[in-house]
Amino acid sequence: MSVAVEGVKAVVLRDDDNVAVAARPIPKGAVLRLGDRTIEVLEPIGLGHKVALDAIEPGESVRKYGQIIGFASRAIRPGSRVHVENLRADLFERDYAFSVEHPEPPKPDRPLTFRGFLRPDGRVGTRNYIAVISTVNCSASTSRYVSDRFRDGAWKTEFPNVDGVFAITHKGGCGLPFEGPDHQILERVLAGFANHPNVAAYVIVGLGCEVGFASHLVEAQDLVTLVVPGTNGASGQPPSRPRTLNIQELGGITSTVEAAVKAVYELLPEANAWSRTEQPASKISLAMECGGSDGNSGITANPALGVAADLLVGHGGSAFLGETTEIYGAEHLLTRRAVSREVGEKLIDRIRWWENYTGMFGAKIDNNPSPGNKAGGLTTIYEKSLGALAKAGSTALVDVVPYAARVDKPGLTFMDTPGYDPPCTTGLIAGGANVLVFTTGRGSVLGLKPTPCIKVATNTPMFERMTDDMDLDAGPILEGEPVESVGRRLFDLILEVADGRPTRSERQGVGEEEFAPWSIGPTL
Protein backbone atom coordinates (compact mmCIF):
# COMPACT_ATOMS: atom_id res chain seq x y z
CA MET A 1 0.00 0.00 0.00
CA SER A 2 1.03 3.64 -0.33
CA VAL A 3 0.78 6.59 1.99
CA ALA A 4 0.67 10.04 0.41
CA VAL A 5 0.03 13.63 1.39
CA GLU A 6 0.16 16.53 -1.05
CA GLY A 7 2.47 14.85 -3.54
CA VAL A 8 4.54 13.05 -0.92
CA LYS A 9 4.46 9.33 -1.49
CA ALA A 10 5.96 6.32 0.26
CA VAL A 11 5.34 2.61 -0.15
CA VAL A 12 4.64 0.15 2.65
CA LEU A 13 5.16 -3.36 1.32
CA ARG A 14 3.67 -5.48 4.15
CA ASP A 15 1.36 -4.74 7.04
CA ASP A 16 3.99 -5.69 9.63
CA ASP A 17 6.80 -3.59 8.09
CA ASN A 18 8.13 -0.81 10.31
CA VAL A 19 9.62 1.19 7.43
CA ALA A 20 8.21 2.72 4.25
CA VAL A 21 10.16 3.41 1.05
CA ALA A 22 10.16 6.82 -0.62
CA ALA A 23 8.56 6.64 -4.07
CA ARG A 24 9.85 10.16 -4.66
CA PRO A 25 12.02 12.46 -2.50
CA ILE A 26 10.27 13.37 0.76
CA PRO A 27 11.12 16.74 2.35
CA LYS A 28 11.67 17.29 6.05
CA GLY A 29 8.40 18.21 7.75
CA ALA A 30 6.15 16.30 5.38
CA VAL A 31 3.36 14.37 7.07
CA LEU A 32 2.57 10.76 6.18
CA ARG A 33 -0.79 9.28 7.14
CA LEU A 34 -0.98 5.54 7.73
CA GLY A 35 -4.50 4.54 8.69
CA ASP A 36 -5.43 6.70 11.67
CA ARG A 37 -1.77 7.55 12.39
CA THR A 38 0.18 10.58 11.25
CA ILE A 39 3.96 10.55 11.02
CA GLU A 40 6.00 13.70 10.62
CA VAL A 41 9.14 13.19 8.53
CA LEU A 42 12.08 14.41 10.62
CA GLU A 43 14.72 14.67 7.86
CA PRO A 44 14.90 14.57 4.05
CA ILE A 45 14.30 11.06 2.64
CA GLY A 46 15.78 10.40 -0.82
CA LEU A 47 14.14 8.35 -3.57
CA GLY A 48 14.36 4.68 -2.63
CA HIS A 49 15.39 5.38 0.97
CA LYS A 50 13.53 4.19 4.06
CA VAL A 51 11.58 6.16 6.65
CA ALA A 52 10.70 4.67 10.04
CA LEU A 53 7.00 4.21 10.76
CA ASP A 54 7.45 3.15 14.39
CA ALA A 55 9.87 3.70 17.24
CA ILE A 56 12.56 1.01 16.95
CA GLU A 57 14.77 0.30 19.95
CA PRO A 58 18.46 -0.68 19.71
CA GLY A 59 18.79 -4.34 18.75
CA GLU A 60 15.20 -4.61 17.48
CA SER A 61 14.64 -5.91 13.96
CA VAL A 62 13.82 -3.64 11.07
CA ARG A 63 11.34 -5.20 8.66
CA LYS A 64 10.74 -4.63 4.94
CA TYR A 65 8.96 -7.08 2.60
CA GLY A 66 7.64 -8.61 5.85
CA GLN A 67 11.19 -9.87 6.48
CA ILE A 68 14.17 -8.86 8.61
CA ILE A 69 16.56 -6.55 6.77
CA GLY A 70 18.74 -5.78 9.81
CA PHE A 71 18.76 -4.56 13.38
CA ALA A 72 18.71 -1.06 14.85
CA SER A 73 22.18 -0.01 15.96
CA ARG A 74 20.64 2.86 17.98
CA ALA A 75 17.19 4.12 18.83
CA ILE A 76 15.20 5.15 15.75
CA ARG A 77 12.32 7.64 16.03
CA PRO A 78 9.25 7.50 13.76
CA GLY A 79 9.86 9.74 10.76
CA SER A 80 13.64 9.22 10.80
CA ARG A 81 15.67 7.92 7.91
CA VAL A 82 16.67 4.28 8.36
CA HIS A 83 20.06 3.67 6.78
CA VAL A 84 23.73 2.98 7.49
CA GLU A 85 23.80 5.36 10.45
CA ASN A 86 21.28 3.33 12.47
CA LEU A 87 20.91 -0.10 10.83
CA ARG A 88 23.33 -3.05 10.87
CA ALA A 89 23.33 -6.61 9.54
CA ASP A 90 23.65 -8.81 12.62
CA LEU A 91 23.55 -12.57 12.06
CA PHE A 92 20.22 -14.30 12.66
CA GLU A 93 18.77 -17.77 12.19
CA ARG A 94 16.58 -18.49 9.15
CA ASP A 95 13.93 -21.21 8.99
CA TYR A 96 14.70 -23.11 5.78
CA ALA A 97 11.52 -25.21 5.94
CA PHE A 98 12.64 -27.32 2.99
CA SER A 99 10.03 -28.01 0.32
CA VAL A 100 6.97 -27.03 2.35
CA GLU A 101 5.49 -24.97 -0.48
CA HIS A 102 4.56 -26.46 -3.85
CA PRO A 103 3.61 -23.52 -6.06
CA GLU A 104 2.18 -24.14 -9.50
CA PRO A 105 3.08 -21.85 -12.42
CA PRO A 106 0.30 -19.78 -13.97
CA LYS A 107 -1.61 -21.48 -16.77
CA PRO A 108 -1.20 -19.61 -20.07
CA ASP A 109 -4.28 -18.21 -21.78
CA ARG A 110 -3.01 -19.46 -25.15
CA PRO A 111 0.20 -20.83 -26.65
CA LEU A 112 2.70 -18.14 -27.62
CA THR A 113 5.53 -18.33 -30.14
CA PHE A 114 8.52 -16.44 -31.45
CA ARG A 115 10.73 -16.90 -34.50
CA GLY A 116 14.10 -18.40 -33.61
CA PHE A 117 16.91 -20.61 -34.91
CA LEU A 118 16.21 -24.28 -34.13
CA ARG A 119 19.49 -26.12 -33.47
CA PRO A 120 20.15 -29.87 -33.82
CA ASP A 121 20.09 -30.43 -30.03
CA GLY A 122 16.57 -28.97 -29.77
CA ARG A 123 17.61 -25.65 -28.27
CA VAL A 124 16.66 -22.46 -30.08
CA GLY A 125 18.78 -19.42 -30.78
CA THR A 126 17.39 -15.92 -30.53
CA ARG A 127 20.45 -14.65 -32.41
CA ASN A 128 22.79 -16.17 -35.03
CA TYR A 129 26.43 -15.21 -34.42
CA ILE A 130 29.89 -16.37 -35.38
CA ALA A 131 32.32 -16.29 -32.44
CA VAL A 132 36.09 -15.90 -32.37
CA ILE A 133 37.08 -17.58 -29.11
CA SER A 134 40.35 -16.72 -27.39
CA THR A 135 41.77 -19.46 -25.15
CA VAL A 136 44.10 -17.09 -23.27
CA ASN A 137 44.68 -13.39 -22.74
CA CYS A 138 47.78 -13.70 -24.95
CA SER A 139 45.53 -14.28 -27.97
CA ALA A 140 42.90 -11.70 -26.99
CA SER A 141 44.16 -8.86 -29.19
CA THR A 142 44.53 -11.21 -32.13
CA SER A 143 40.96 -12.42 -31.69
CA ARG A 144 39.72 -8.85 -31.49
CA TYR A 145 41.59 -7.91 -34.67
CA VAL A 146 39.69 -10.71 -36.42
CA SER A 147 36.27 -9.54 -35.27
CA ASP A 148 37.19 -5.94 -36.14
CA ARG A 149 37.56 -6.96 -39.77
CA PHE A 150 33.82 -7.72 -39.86
CA ARG A 151 32.63 -4.69 -37.93
CA ASP A 152 31.69 -2.61 -40.98
CA GLY A 153 28.96 -5.09 -41.90
CA ALA A 154 29.83 -5.05 -45.60
CA TRP A 155 29.26 -8.80 -45.71
CA LYS A 156 25.68 -8.49 -44.36
CA THR A 157 24.09 -8.07 -47.79
CA GLU A 158 25.31 -11.50 -48.83
CA PHE A 159 24.72 -13.15 -45.42
CA PRO A 160 21.62 -11.46 -43.94
CA ASN A 161 20.83 -14.27 -41.47
CA VAL A 162 24.09 -13.72 -39.56
CA ASP A 163 23.81 -11.20 -36.72
CA GLY A 164 27.52 -10.53 -36.43
CA VAL A 165 31.04 -11.74 -35.70
CA PHE A 166 32.23 -11.13 -32.15
CA ALA A 167 35.35 -11.91 -30.14
CA ILE A 168 35.34 -13.70 -26.78
CA THR A 169 38.37 -12.35 -24.92
CA HIS A 170 39.37 -12.50 -21.26
CA LYS A 171 42.26 -12.07 -18.80
CA GLY A 172 42.81 -15.75 -17.99
CA GLY A 173 43.91 -18.97 -19.64
CA CYS A 174 47.33 -19.28 -18.02
CA GLY A 175 49.01 -18.85 -14.63
CA LEU A 176 46.56 -21.36 -13.12
CA PRO A 177 46.89 -25.02 -12.10
CA PHE A 178 46.45 -27.33 -15.09
CA GLU A 179 43.04 -29.07 -14.86
CA GLY A 180 42.46 -27.36 -11.50
CA PRO A 181 39.19 -25.63 -10.57
CA ASP A 182 39.89 -22.40 -12.45
CA HIS A 183 40.99 -24.26 -15.58
CA GLN A 184 37.85 -26.38 -15.45
CA ILE A 185 35.62 -23.32 -14.94
CA LEU A 186 37.22 -21.43 -17.83
CA GLU A 187 36.87 -24.36 -20.21
CA ARG A 188 33.26 -24.92 -19.12
CA VAL A 189 32.50 -21.24 -19.81
CA LEU A 190 34.23 -21.20 -23.20
CA ALA A 191 32.44 -24.41 -24.19
CA GLY A 192 29.13 -22.94 -23.03
CA PHE A 193 29.63 -20.01 -25.40
CA ALA A 194 30.91 -22.18 -28.24
CA ASN A 195 27.90 -24.51 -27.91
CA HIS A 196 25.47 -21.67 -27.22
CA PRO A 197 22.21 -21.76 -29.19
CA ASN A 198 22.89 -18.17 -30.29
CA VAL A 199 26.22 -19.18 -31.89
CA ALA A 200 26.07 -20.81 -35.32
CA ALA A 201 29.82 -21.25 -35.81
CA TYR A 202 33.13 -20.39 -34.19
CA VAL A 203 36.90 -20.31 -34.54
CA ILE A 204 39.26 -20.88 -31.59
CA VAL A 205 42.41 -18.76 -31.36
CA GLY A 206 45.22 -19.65 -28.95
CA LEU A 207 48.83 -18.70 -28.36
CA GLY A 208 50.23 -22.24 -28.25
CA CYS A 209 52.03 -22.57 -24.90
CA GLU A 210 49.24 -21.63 -22.47
CA VAL A 211 47.78 -23.82 -19.71
CA GLY A 212 44.35 -23.69 -21.33
CA PHE A 213 45.59 -24.75 -24.76
CA ALA A 214 43.10 -25.09 -27.60
CA SER A 215 43.28 -28.82 -28.24
CA HIS A 216 42.69 -29.57 -24.56
CA LEU A 217 39.57 -27.37 -24.61
CA VAL A 218 38.26 -29.19 -27.68
CA GLU A 219 38.93 -32.67 -26.31
CA ALA A 220 37.92 -32.08 -22.68
CA GLN A 221 34.66 -30.38 -23.65
CA ASP A 222 34.02 -32.60 -26.70
CA LEU A 223 33.52 -29.57 -28.92
CA VAL A 224 32.08 -30.13 -32.39
CA THR A 225 30.69 -27.90 -35.12
CA LEU A 226 27.00 -27.61 -35.86
CA VAL A 227 25.54 -29.64 -38.69
CA VAL A 228 24.63 -27.38 -41.59
CA PRO A 229 20.81 -27.11 -41.89
CA GLY A 230 19.29 -29.60 -44.30
CA THR A 231 22.15 -32.11 -44.23
CA ASN A 232 21.13 -34.03 -41.07
CA GLY A 233 24.74 -35.19 -40.80
CA ALA A 234 24.20 -37.81 -43.51
CA SER A 235 24.42 -36.66 -47.12
CA GLY A 236 26.15 -33.45 -46.11
CA GLN A 237 28.50 -32.49 -43.32
CA PRO A 238 28.49 -34.46 -40.05
CA PRO A 239 29.68 -32.81 -36.85
CA SER A 240 33.43 -32.25 -36.91
CA ARG A 241 36.10 -30.77 -34.68
CA PRO A 242 36.17 -26.95 -34.78
CA ARG A 243 38.92 -24.95 -36.43
CA THR A 244 41.74 -24.04 -33.99
CA LEU A 245 44.53 -21.60 -34.74
CA ASN A 246 47.67 -21.04 -32.65
CA ILE A 247 49.72 -17.86 -33.04
CA GLN A 248 53.06 -19.57 -32.40
CA GLU A 249 52.41 -22.25 -35.01
CA LEU A 250 51.23 -19.80 -37.67
CA GLY A 251 54.17 -17.43 -37.28
CA GLY A 252 52.71 -14.50 -35.36
CA ILE A 253 49.76 -12.16 -35.10
CA THR A 254 49.52 -10.98 -38.71
CA SER A 255 49.42 -14.43 -40.26
CA THR A 256 47.04 -15.69 -37.58
CA VAL A 257 44.62 -12.83 -38.17
CA GLU A 258 44.61 -13.50 -41.91
CA ALA A 259 44.06 -17.24 -41.37
CA ALA A 260 41.25 -16.62 -38.89
CA VAL A 261 39.55 -14.05 -41.14
CA LYS A 262 39.68 -16.58 -43.97
CA ALA A 263 38.18 -19.23 -41.65
CA VAL A 264 35.33 -16.89 -40.68
CA TYR A 265 34.57 -16.12 -44.32
CA GLU A 266 34.38 -19.87 -44.93
CA LEU A 267 31.93 -20.20 -42.04
CA LEU A 268 29.63 -17.36 -43.13
CA PRO A 269 27.68 -19.41 -45.72
CA GLU A 270 27.11 -22.18 -43.15
CA ALA A 271 25.95 -19.71 -40.52
CA ASN A 272 23.72 -17.97 -43.04
CA ALA A 273 22.03 -21.30 -43.86
CA TRP A 274 20.21 -21.05 -40.54
CA SER A 275 16.95 -19.13 -40.64
CA ARG A 276 14.24 -18.21 -38.16
CA THR A 277 11.24 -20.51 -37.81
CA GLU A 278 8.20 -20.42 -35.56
CA GLN A 279 9.08 -21.77 -32.10
CA PRO A 280 7.10 -22.14 -28.85
CA ALA A 281 7.75 -19.81 -25.91
CA SER A 282 8.97 -22.89 -24.00
CA LYS A 283 12.23 -22.61 -25.97
CA ILE A 284 13.17 -19.37 -24.21
CA SER A 285 15.85 -19.73 -21.54
CA LEU A 286 15.77 -16.54 -19.49
CA ALA A 287 18.71 -15.31 -17.40
CA MET A 288 17.78 -12.83 -14.67
CA GLU A 289 20.20 -10.33 -13.18
CA CYS A 290 20.06 -7.09 -11.20
CA GLY A 291 22.88 -4.58 -10.93
CA GLY A 292 23.33 -0.99 -9.90
CA SER A 293 20.36 -1.63 -7.61
CA ASP A 294 18.52 0.91 -5.48
CA GLY A 295 15.86 0.89 -2.77
CA ASN A 296 13.10 0.52 -5.36
CA SER A 297 14.62 -2.47 -7.19
CA GLY A 298 12.69 -4.88 -4.97
CA ILE A 299 9.48 -2.88 -5.36
CA THR A 300 9.29 -2.27 -9.11
CA ALA A 301 11.61 -3.89 -11.68
CA ASN A 302 12.52 -7.08 -9.81
CA PRO A 303 8.94 -8.06 -8.92
CA ALA A 304 7.89 -7.24 -12.50
CA LEU A 305 10.63 -9.55 -13.75
CA GLY A 306 9.35 -12.17 -11.31
CA VAL A 307 5.93 -11.91 -12.94
CA ALA A 308 7.49 -12.31 -16.40
CA ALA A 309 9.52 -15.32 -15.20
CA ASP A 310 6.37 -16.95 -13.81
CA LEU A 311 4.59 -16.43 -17.13
CA LEU A 312 7.52 -17.98 -19.01
CA VAL A 313 7.64 -20.99 -16.66
CA GLY A 314 3.90 -21.34 -17.19
CA HIS A 315 4.61 -21.71 -20.91
CA GLY A 316 7.16 -24.43 -20.20
CA GLY A 317 10.24 -22.21 -20.45
CA SER A 318 13.33 -21.96 -18.27
CA ALA A 319 14.30 -19.11 -15.97
CA PHE A 320 17.56 -19.03 -14.10
CA LEU A 321 18.88 -16.89 -11.35
CA GLY A 322 22.40 -16.42 -9.99
CA GLU A 323 24.18 -14.16 -7.47
CA THR A 324 24.59 -16.45 -4.46
CA THR A 325 26.05 -13.59 -2.45
CA GLU A 326 22.97 -11.52 -3.22
CA ILE A 327 20.37 -13.95 -1.98
CA TYR A 328 22.20 -14.21 1.36
CA GLY A 329 19.67 -13.62 4.11
CA ALA A 330 16.79 -14.43 1.79
CA GLU A 331 17.72 -17.98 0.81
CA HIS A 332 15.09 -19.38 3.19
CA LEU A 333 12.39 -18.08 0.83
CA LEU A 334 13.80 -20.24 -1.97
CA THR A 335 14.32 -23.41 0.09
CA ARG A 336 10.63 -23.39 0.98
CA ARG A 337 9.83 -23.59 -2.74
CA ALA A 338 12.40 -26.27 -3.59
CA VAL A 339 10.89 -29.31 -5.30
CA SER A 340 12.71 -31.53 -2.81
CA ARG A 341 14.78 -31.28 0.35
CA GLU A 342 17.80 -32.36 -1.71
CA VAL A 343 17.47 -29.33 -4.00
CA GLY A 344 17.01 -27.00 -1.03
CA GLU A 345 20.07 -28.40 0.73
CA LYS A 346 22.16 -27.92 -2.42
CA LEU A 347 21.40 -24.21 -2.14
CA ILE A 348 22.36 -24.06 1.55
CA ASP A 349 25.59 -25.92 0.78
CA ARG A 350 26.52 -23.09 -1.58
CA ILE A 351 25.65 -20.48 1.07
CA ARG A 352 27.96 -22.21 3.56
CA TRP A 353 30.70 -22.44 0.92
CA TRP A 354 30.51 -18.69 0.36
CA GLU A 355 30.64 -17.96 4.09
CA ASN A 356 33.86 -19.98 4.28
CA TYR A 357 35.27 -18.61 1.01
CA THR A 358 34.83 -14.95 1.92
CA GLY A 359 36.18 -15.63 5.41
CA MET A 360 39.42 -17.01 3.93
CA PHE A 361 40.19 -13.52 2.65
CA GLY A 362 39.04 -11.65 5.76
CA ALA A 363 35.94 -10.42 3.96
CA LYS A 364 32.28 -10.55 4.88
CA ILE A 365 29.37 -11.08 2.56
CA ASP A 366 27.87 -7.90 4.02
CA ASN A 367 30.68 -5.93 2.38
CA ASN A 368 27.97 -5.86 -0.30
CA PRO A 369 25.89 -3.57 -0.96
CA SER A 370 28.20 -1.29 -2.92
CA PRO A 371 28.54 2.46 -2.27
CA GLY A 372 26.24 3.11 -5.23
CA ASN A 373 23.62 0.71 -3.85
CA LYS A 374 23.74 2.55 -0.53
CA ALA A 375 23.41 5.92 -2.23
CA GLY A 376 20.24 4.52 -3.82
CA GLY A 377 18.76 3.54 -0.45
CA LEU A 378 19.93 -0.04 0.14
CA THR A 379 21.56 -0.56 3.53
CA THR A 380 22.30 -4.24 4.27
CA ILE A 381 22.88 -7.40 2.27
CA TYR A 382 19.63 -8.78 3.71
CA GLU A 383 17.65 -5.90 2.24
CA LYS A 384 19.45 -6.17 -1.09
CA SER A 385 18.94 -9.93 -1.20
CA LEU A 386 15.23 -9.78 -0.45
CA GLY A 387 14.78 -7.29 -3.27
CA ALA A 388 16.99 -9.29 -5.63
CA LEU A 389 15.07 -12.48 -4.95
CA ALA A 390 11.88 -10.85 -6.18
CA LYS A 391 13.20 -11.61 -9.70
CA ALA A 392 12.61 -15.31 -9.00
CA GLY A 393 8.83 -14.91 -9.05
CA SER A 394 6.74 -17.48 -7.22
CA THR A 395 7.24 -20.84 -8.95
CA ALA A 396 9.04 -23.91 -7.58
CA LEU A 397 12.85 -24.13 -7.46
CA VAL A 398 13.62 -27.15 -9.64
CA ASP A 399 17.43 -27.31 -9.40
CA VAL A 400 20.66 -25.75 -8.13
CA VAL A 401 23.64 -26.02 -10.49
CA PRO A 402 27.35 -25.10 -10.47
CA TYR A 403 28.73 -22.03 -12.18
CA ALA A 404 28.36 -22.11 -15.98
CA ALA A 405 26.71 -25.54 -15.97
CA ARG A 406 24.28 -26.12 -18.83
CA VAL A 407 20.67 -25.62 -17.72
CA ASP A 408 18.25 -27.97 -19.46
CA LYS A 409 15.34 -28.28 -17.03
CA PRO A 410 12.21 -26.21 -17.55
CA GLY A 411 11.22 -24.09 -14.57
CA LEU A 412 13.23 -21.99 -12.10
CA THR A 413 16.89 -22.98 -11.62
CA PHE A 414 19.47 -21.35 -9.36
CA MET A 415 23.10 -21.14 -10.55
CA ASP A 416 25.93 -20.59 -8.06
CA THR A 417 27.64 -17.36 -9.17
CA PRO A 418 29.24 -14.28 -7.65
CA GLY A 419 27.09 -11.19 -7.31
CA TYR A 420 29.37 -9.07 -9.49
CA ASP A 421 27.51 -8.54 -12.74
CA PRO A 422 30.06 -9.52 -15.46
CA PRO A 423 31.09 -12.93 -14.02
CA CYS A 424 27.51 -13.65 -12.97
CA THR A 425 26.01 -12.97 -16.40
CA THR A 426 28.93 -14.76 -18.08
CA GLY A 427 28.05 -17.90 -16.10
CA LEU A 428 24.32 -17.60 -16.78
CA ILE A 429 24.84 -17.19 -20.51
CA ALA A 430 27.35 -20.06 -20.58
CA GLY A 431 24.50 -22.10 -19.08
CA GLY A 432 22.50 -21.50 -22.27
CA ALA A 433 20.39 -18.38 -21.64
CA ASN A 434 19.15 -17.07 -24.97
CA VAL A 435 17.62 -13.90 -23.43
CA LEU A 436 18.94 -11.83 -20.51
CA VAL A 437 16.86 -9.36 -18.48
CA PHE A 438 18.91 -6.96 -16.37
CA THR A 439 17.16 -4.71 -13.86
CA THR A 440 18.87 -1.58 -12.57
CA GLY A 441 18.09 1.35 -10.32
CA ARG A 442 21.30 3.34 -10.61
CA GLY A 443 21.79 2.70 -14.32
CA SER A 444 23.86 -0.23 -15.59
CA VAL A 445 24.87 -0.35 -19.24
CA LEU A 446 25.89 -4.02 -19.42
CA GLY A 447 25.36 -6.18 -22.49
CA LEU A 448 26.89 -9.58 -23.24
CA LYS A 449 27.05 -11.17 -26.67
CA PRO A 450 25.73 -13.48 -28.01
CA THR A 451 22.63 -13.01 -25.80
CA PRO A 452 20.41 -9.92 -26.12
CA CYS A 453 20.19 -7.97 -22.86
CA ILE A 454 16.94 -6.19 -21.91
CA LYS A 455 17.48 -3.35 -19.39
CA VAL A 456 14.66 -2.52 -16.99
CA ALA A 457 14.80 0.73 -15.01
CA THR A 458 13.43 0.68 -11.47
CA ASN A 459 12.50 4.37 -11.46
CA THR A 460 11.37 6.87 -14.04
CA PRO A 461 13.93 9.66 -13.36
CA MET A 462 16.80 7.30 -14.18
CA PHE A 463 14.94 5.86 -17.19
CA GLU A 464 14.48 9.36 -18.60
CA ARG A 465 18.10 10.29 -17.83
CA MET A 466 19.45 7.16 -19.56
CA THR A 467 16.79 6.58 -22.18
CA ASP A 468 19.33 5.43 -24.80
CA ASP A 469 20.34 2.53 -22.54
CA MET A 470 17.06 1.41 -20.95
CA ASP A 471 14.48 -0.82 -22.67
CA LEU A 472 11.60 -0.62 -20.18
CA ASP A 473 10.57 1.70 -17.35
CA ALA A 474 9.17 -0.04 -14.26
CA GLY A 475 8.88 3.30 -12.45
CA PRO A 476 5.12 3.62 -13.11
CA ILE A 477 4.64 0.98 -10.40
CA LEU A 478 5.57 3.70 -7.89
CA GLU A 479 2.72 5.79 -9.29
CA GLY A 480 0.15 3.03 -8.97
CA GLU A 481 0.45 0.80 -12.05
CA PRO A 482 0.11 -2.84 -10.90
CA VAL A 483 3.27 -4.94 -10.82
CA GLU A 484 1.42 -7.59 -12.83
CA SER A 485 0.76 -5.10 -15.62
CA VAL A 486 4.42 -4.11 -15.97
CA GLY A 487 5.44 -7.78 -15.67
CA ARG A 488 3.18 -8.72 -18.58
CA ARG A 489 4.60 -5.89 -20.67
CA LEU A 490 8.08 -7.18 -19.88
CA PHE A 491 7.08 -10.73 -20.87
CA ASP A 492 5.77 -9.42 -24.20
CA LEU A 493 9.07 -7.57 -24.70
CA ILE A 494 11.03 -10.78 -23.98
CA LEU A 495 9.11 -12.51 -26.78
CA GLU A 496 9.71 -9.60 -29.17
CA VAL A 497 13.46 -9.57 -28.41
CA ALA A 498 13.63 -13.35 -28.81
CA ASP A 499 11.95 -12.81 -32.18
CA GLY A 500 14.75 -10.47 -33.27
CA ARG A 501 13.90 -7.01 -31.96
CA PRO A 502 17.24 -5.37 -31.05
CA THR A 503 17.77 -4.17 -27.50
CA ARG A 504 19.31 -0.82 -26.58
CA SER A 505 22.65 -2.43 -25.74
CA GLU A 506 22.65 -4.26 -29.07
CA ARG A 507 21.98 -1.02 -30.94
CA GLN A 508 25.05 0.47 -29.26
CA GLY A 509 27.24 -2.56 -29.96
CA VAL A 510 27.77 -3.39 -26.29
CA GLY A 511 28.68 -6.93 -25.32
CA GLU A 512 32.26 -7.94 -26.13
CA GLU A 513 34.13 -6.35 -23.20
CA GLU A 514 31.85 -7.77 -20.50
CA PHE A 515 32.82 -11.44 -20.87
CA ALA A 516 34.40 -12.27 -17.48
CA PRO A 517 34.68 -15.91 -16.32
CA TRP A 518 34.78 -16.35 -12.56
CA SER A 519 38.21 -17.14 -11.09
CA ILE A 520 38.25 -18.59 -7.58
CA GLY A 521 41.89 -19.54 -7.08
CA PRO A 522 45.40 -18.04 -7.11
CA THR A 523 47.17 -16.60 -10.11
CA LEU A 524 50.48 -18.45 -10.32
Image (cartoon, grey):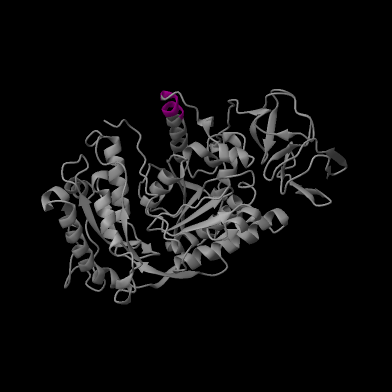
Quadrant hosting residue 423: top left
Specify the segment rendered in magenta: 355-360
Give the left or right position of residue 494, taking residue 144 as reference.
right
Relative to residue 484, is residue 3 depicted above or below? above
Residue nearer the viewer, 82 or 197: 82
Q: State the residue at coordinates (22%, 54%).
A: 204
Is residue 512 among what the camera can see? yes
- Residue at the farthest bottom position: 157
Task: Confirm whether residue 223 shows in the render.
Answer: no
Residue 121 x %, y %: 30, 61
Relative side of 223 to 103, left or right? left
Determine if the magenta segment contains residue 359.
Answer: yes
Does 149 appear above or below 169? below
Going by the image, does 284 lie left or right of 301?
left
Residue 305 to residue 213: above or below:
below
Task: Please tell me which residue lies in front, 268 or 251.
Answer: 251
Query: Which of the 4 image quarters holds residue 233?
Result: bottom left
